[in-house]
Image: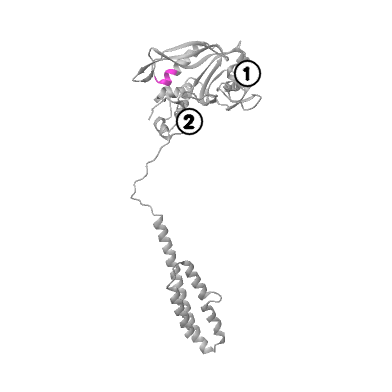
Amino acid sequence: MSDLNNILSSFERKFSSIKNKDDLQNLKSEFFGKNGSISLQFKKMGSLNPEERKNFAKELNTIKDQLTSKIEKKFKDFENLEINQKLKNEKIDITLPIRSIQHGKIHPVSQVIDEISSIFSEVGFSVAEGPDVESEHNNFTALNTPDDHPARDMHDTFYLDRDKKTLLRTHTSPVQIRTMLNGKPPFKIIVPGRTYRCDSDQTHAPMFHQLEGLHIDKNITMGHLKGCLNYFIREFFEVKKIKMRFRPSHFPFTEPSAEVDIGYKLENGKIVIGEGDKWLEILGCGMVHPNVLKNTKVDPNKYQGFAFGMGIDRLAMLKYGINDLRAFFETDYRWLNHFGFDPLDVPTNYRGLSRWY
């Protein structure tokens, strides 16, 4: 019995100094492991006579149950302590004010593309798309651009190979070529998209957005072109009247060609589109050159049409008073939060294009 008392005393002494679960596990192994103090006492019973074994076993089992109970309770205490500490560290203060919800904004360029698409869809135009990487043929040759035209030079165009057969498109007009080659007239499309040129300053960027328009059918005239553009400009700038003039110009892919100016005036340092004694160039246009029709297997004796092209970024700057084109691509959330649009405010003609927040 003295051995059992010594074991109990030793356990109590060591148990009182336990600080963590590892210490407790070591103590359990010391007393209940294969060669632990309690385990050795059970092995010792074989050498006792029946009467002594009976009393010894009873006392040993009592001590075993007592020590096991203490160890299990201590394990639970450590587990509860860990859980409480974890809950304390992960506690959420429900009295704190909620964070304000930040809504994203639609970029002005995306907004303007949607506005233009909405306007032209009202008069029967559909939206066409094409790849940014184009062939030299679709970008220049098929559009009647001479071999010595300055636009073909490397200082103006991003070529992707030494032979100058592949490039980043300099306008979205190649989509017109693709559309006419893959279909039959009539054609009535607009083509918004990214374009690329070697240029960068306050009003130019090496990557910018353009929109081309094309209408090919029988008996199309400059009168149709003028009426279409007059309607577009009035709807886009949301004015009832607009002063327009067509200045003779030259583009390889149209003949005759013109640049379109619109009237404006300055009020409190801001441009007001519509009436006024000042003129602002806004886009280029003309009747599709017969050579372009021939290059796309469209009979120029049977069909004719008009085309126009405009800078989407420039239109956004004019309409919404943005002074620096480079700000479009700087990913400044503060700028976008100021000039951006509500994502649920989809432009439509019948309820106003630009309810700007």
Q: Earlier in the sequence, mark 2 or mark 1?
A: 1
Of circles 2 and 1, the one toward us is 2
**Chain part drawn in magenta:** 233-238
Q: Is residue 12 above or below residue 266?
A: below
Query: Which residue sits at x=53%, y=76%?
Result: 36
Q: Quadrant of residue 253?
A: top right
Decide if residue 216 is in sight here: yes
Residue 315 colored magenta?
Answer: no
Judging from the image, the colouring scheme is: one colour
Quadrant where the image shows the C terminus: top left
Mark 1 belongs to which amino acid?
Answer: Thr
Q: Which residue is mark 1?
A: 141
Compare residues 16 and 81 and report the one nearer the observer: 16
Query: Which residue sits at x=61%, y=25%?
Result: 159
Instruction: Point out residue 178 in the picture as x, y percentages from the top left corner.
Output: 60, 23
Decide if residue 1 is in sight here: no
Instruction: Point out residue 214 in the picture as x, y percentages from the top left corner.
Output: 54, 18
Instruction: Point out residue 276 in the picture as x, y percentages from the top left corner.
Output: 38, 13
Residue 19: image tag: none
Residue 236 colored magenta?
Answer: yes
Compare residues 220 and 7 and report the one nearer the observer: 7
